[in-house]
Amino acid sequence: MKYHLEVENTGNVHLTLQAQIAYRARAGFGSGMLDLGEITILPGTVRYFEGFLPAPPALGYFRAEAVIKYGPDMYTFDTEKRSGCGFWALPLLWGLIFLAAGTGAWYLVKFLRGRFRVSLKVTRR
């Protein structure tokens, strides 16, 4: 699963920051955190963080949150900004497995229904 994060320095001084992406399931299992490390951004520029989640979520709706920490100097990170979004994780392989299993079950029922017919004859004595 791919992520894309943009950070813009709108100030007039160099900005050193630490970045992280955390994601968690709305319901069920699956969560993780990705540390993007420290980076310096020049004034008036945008930095892009792109890559793939190392342990992608399995299935369901997830909430991702980017946490950016920065401060007055290169060693103090006392200010924190957060931004988040939601996303669905629907792996293609799981969908194909469920589709194949459903199709196989349908053909099995169709085959067995045509193979074993039960006839019931009621006669009066």
Image: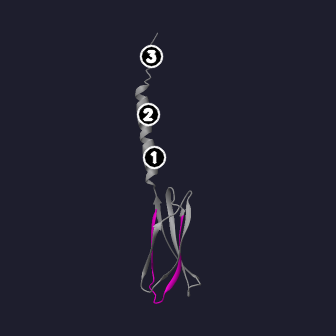
Q: Which mark is residue 97?
A: 1
Q: Which residue is mark 3?
A: 122
18 within the magenta span? yes
50 left or right of 67 in image? left
Residue 3 % position (x, y): 46, 67
Visual colour scheme:
one colour
Q: Residues within 10 Å of mark 3 (few under 14, many from 20)?
A: few
Q: Residues within 10 Å of mark 1 (few under 14, many from 20)?
A: few
Real-space Cα separation, disc 2 to disc 3, in angstroms: 27 Å
Callout 2, which amino acid? Val
Q: Secondary structure at mark 1?
A: helix
Q: CA distance from mark 3 to mark 1?
A: 45 Å
* Nearer-the-camera pick, 48 or 81: 48
Residue at 51%, 65% (x, y): give it: 63
- Magenta span covers which residues? 1-23
Amino acid type shown at disc 3: Val
> Across the whole image, how many numbered discs are drawn on residues?
3
Q: Give the mark, 2 or 3, whose residue is nearer the N terminus.
A: 2
In reply to whether residue 121 is colored magenta, the answer given is no
Q: Which residue is mark 2?
A: 109
Callout 3: helix, strand or loop? loop
